[in-house]
Image (cartoon, rainbow, N blue to C red):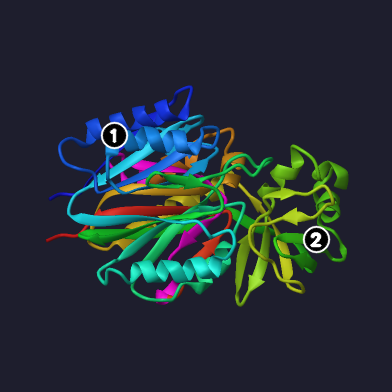
């Protein structure tokens, strides 16, 4: 059976009605046959259980995973206060799982994932959606054993002020969790990623970091360093709107011979940066600044990289996970990253996606998956030729 994908998108006053409308639309476009997997992305303003109930009422037992986002993405661009559902069907199998302990231990969650993956030796890929505010995605990724299974996904986002976010798997919803789907059969995935942020010359030493809080740069509160470089007072950086806009100015931290992007979720009242992964004391960091042109180029390159990784498989669907910083940077041209991806994939490939607080991509040369900040991840689904 030829692999197919269909997208449904809806806006409504409540989550159940939006989920119901999105599912009805996607099922109509999919035609006859039972979906093999549903990928659900919903505005964080909706109640997770209401959205899942609306979708599940029409999907019956089809595997379903999803996450919350401040805005969702489709072929037509960016949509707020919306629910988007991608349905996939064809000659493949999928299983959805809910792992509730992710916020408590990324390492133990990784061990559980590996146990679930080993239940079917022919599993080839796994999609992961984890909490973007609570839990250590870098710990999760490093604890996943290298192997033939390809992991990709992202971290749910939502209201940066309250930390409101959720994950979904089947009829289970909540925060602090991880939703996973294991895929096998004639379906293949190719992943590409990139970012549009570059160093501007300012270098710091991380002098105090505790857990997810980066407290001082060069011996001073992090907000004071940004105030000196970017203007406004340190106090201004600790309160809205600047405390959230700090994500537009991430740090490039040295990791081996690589400069890894690490971005604050917000600036706290004490001037520290709230991150969603650890940044070690004593390492050098560089201020990064993004641009529209660099992001557009990164989106195109990510789509090209995904197609190359797909090999001879024919693309039939793309999941696009974009860091929330892109939504801020591209405010004057909303959805511009989707247009760049479409220029590479073609307008015939259905697209669904959303804005995230981090991205998970396959490791280099078969290694453990990698956790990224500030990137666009293009996950292209393809059908192998028979």
Element type where label 2 sits in the image: strand
The residue positioned 55% from the left and 46% from the top of the image is: 293
Q: Which numbered tag is attached to residue 215? A: 2
Distance, label 1 to label 2, CA atoms, is: 48 Å
Segment colored magenta: 342-366
The residue positioned 49% from the left and 51% from the top of the image is: 297
User: Are there few (<14), some (14-19), or many (20+) residues within 10 Å of tag 2?
Assistant: many
Query: Can residue 110 be seen from the camera position used here?
Result: yes
The residue positioned 34% from the left and 53% from the top of the image is: 380
Q: Is residue 230 left or right of residue 379?
A: right
Q: Which numbered tag is attached to residue 58? A: 1
Quarter holding the C terminus is: bottom left
Residue 268's place in the image compared with 333, above or below, is below
Asked whether 362 falls inside the magenta stretch, the response is yes
**How far across and down, in percent of the image, does residue 7 sit?**
32, 37
Query: Can residue 305 be seen from the camera position used here?
Result: no
Towards the viewer: 206 or 308:
206
Towards the viewer: 326 or 60:
60
Element type where label 1 sits in the image: helix
Asked whether 266 falls inside the magenta stretch, the response is no
**How far across and down, in percent of the image, does residue 158 sit?**
58, 41
Q: Is residue 38 left or right of residue 340?
A: left
**How far across and down, in percent of the image, does residue 3 sit?**
20, 49
Q: Is residue 320 left or right of residue 325?
A: left
């Amino acid at each position: 059976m030829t692999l197919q994908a269909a997208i449904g998108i809806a806006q409504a006053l409540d989550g159940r009605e939006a989920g119901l409308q999105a599912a009805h639309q996607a099922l109509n476009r999919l035609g006859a046959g039972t979906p093999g997997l549903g990928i659900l992305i919903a505005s964080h303003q909706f109640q997770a259980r209401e959205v899942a109930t609306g979708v599940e009422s029409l999907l019956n037992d089809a595997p379903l995973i999803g996450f919350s986002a401040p805005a969702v993405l489709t072929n037509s661009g960016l949509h707020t206060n919306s629910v988007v559902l991608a349905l996939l069907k064809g000659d493949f199998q999928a299983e959805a799982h809910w792992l509730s302990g992710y916020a408590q231990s990324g390492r133990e969650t990784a061990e559980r994932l590996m146990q679930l993956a080993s239940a079917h030796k022919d599993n080839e890929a796994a999609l992961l959606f984890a909490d973007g505010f609570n839990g250590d995605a870098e710990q999760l990724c490093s604890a996943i054993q290298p192997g033939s299974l390809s992991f990709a996904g992202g971290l749910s986002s939502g209201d940066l002020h309250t930390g409101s976010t959720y994950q979904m798997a089947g009829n289970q919803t909540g925060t602090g969790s991880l939703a996973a789907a294991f895929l096998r059969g004639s379906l293949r995935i190719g992943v590409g990623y990139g970012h549009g942020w570059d160093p501007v010359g300012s270098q710091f030493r991380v002098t105090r970091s505790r857990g997810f809080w980066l407290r001082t740069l060069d011996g001073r509160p992090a907000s004071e360093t940004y105030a000196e470089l970017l203007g406004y007072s340190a106090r201004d950086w600790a309160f809205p709107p600047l405390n959230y806009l700090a994500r537009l100015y991430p740090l490039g931290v040295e990791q081996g011979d690589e400069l890894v992007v690490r971005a604050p979720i917000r600036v706290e009242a004490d001037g520290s940066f709230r991150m969603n992964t650890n940044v070690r004391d004593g390492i050098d960091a560089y201020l990064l600044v993004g641009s529209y042109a660099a992001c557009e180029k990164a989106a195109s390159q990510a789509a090209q990289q995904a197609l190359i990784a797909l090999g001879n498989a024919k693309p039939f669907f793309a999941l696009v996970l974009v860091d929330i910083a892109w939504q801020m940077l591209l405010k004057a041209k909303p959805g511009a990253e989707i247009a760049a991806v479409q220029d590479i994939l073609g307008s015939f490939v259905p697209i669904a996606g959303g804005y995230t607080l981090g991205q998970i991509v396959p490791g280099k040369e078969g290694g453990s998956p990698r956790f990224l900040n500030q990137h666009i991840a293009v996950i292209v689904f393809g059908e192998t030729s028979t």
